[in-house]
Amino acid sequence: MTTIEIILVTLVAAVCGMGSVLDERQTHRPLVACTLIGWVLGDLQTGVIVGGTLEMLALGWMNVGAAMAPDAALASVIAAILVIKGGQDKGTAIAIAIPVAAAGQVLTIFVRTLTIFLQHKADDYAEKANFRGIELCHFTGLSLQALRVAIPTLAVALVAGTDTVTAALDAIPEVVTRGLQIAGGFIVVVGYAMVINMMRAGALMPFFFIGFVIASFSNYNLVGLGFLGACLALIYIQLNPQFNQSQAVASNNKRELADDELEGL
């Protein structure tokens, strides 16, 4: 990798690390992170493919209460670098992402533990109405999250594509990599199940099964399935009275107003 590529990759990793706690722009999600890595490394297509693959894997990765989810940001950035510059295949990305995500989970717990000091310090600044000090605490904590992803990414970027990395990845037994790929497939199913369970939208389950049947027994690609799903969603919204209550109320109000005017005449 060139010096410019290493700098850009490190900056993207820092943005993804900050996104993992901000959640505003979703830059820590695999689809966004891998796409950005592919863009700065000159292989946008591979970045999108790797990101889409890992996005299905990380669909159910979310923080619930005090339970920390595996780190999608670090896993996505490193997996994309190793696939694009390390010459690894897409299946290896899944095998790489799972242990890296677990390591990132430990790192984010460590960083969040460190930021407890900053929270107490911000409370002290708040009692003194020191707004600049409060801002400094916020930006310091955010910088630690950026470094949490940027530093490991920088280390990987410096050795990506070298014989050492290639030999290390090739030394992993096939039974391990294949097992991690299969486990990643199970995690995708669990992720879908968690999302559906949280939605608790029993009325929409027929559409889920319809989509599953169409995807299994047809040659539609993802673009076609996406358009089909959007059309079904629009039809459902138009026909479901639940989404037309406001219009019905407005129509009734207009009708009552018209009746009152006629009675006044």
Image (tube, rainbow, N blue to C red):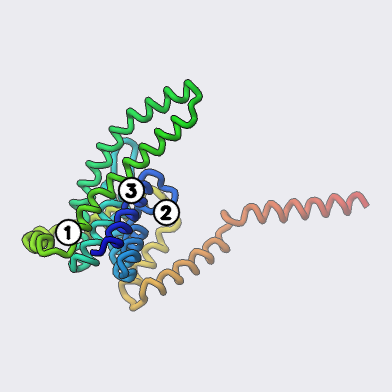
Residue type, label 1: Val
Q: Nearer the viewer, residue 47 or 132?
A: 132
Q: Secondary structure at mark 2?
A: helix
Whichever of labels 2 and 3 marks the residue nearer the N terminus, that label is 3
Mark 2 or 1, closer to the camera:
1
Q: Percent from the top left, x then y, of residue 15? A: 36, 51
| Viewport quadrant of the N terminus | bottom left
Task: Calculate the distance from the C-alpha at mark 2 to the C-alpha at mark 3.
Answer: 36 Å
Dot 2 and dot 3 residues touching (CB under 8 Å): no
Q: Secondary structure at mark 1?
A: helix
Dot 1 corresponds to which residue?
159
Label at residue 100: none
Q: Secondary structure at mark 3?
A: helix
Dot 2 corresponds to which residue?
202
Q: Percent from the top left, x then y, of residue 194? A: 33, 50
Residue 174 seen: no
Residue type, label 2: Gly
Classify mark 2: residues with Cα within 10 Å, few (<14), some (14-19) or many (20+). few
Classify mark 3: residues with Cα within 10 Å, few (<14), some (14-19) or many (20+). many
Residue sitting at the far bottom: 219
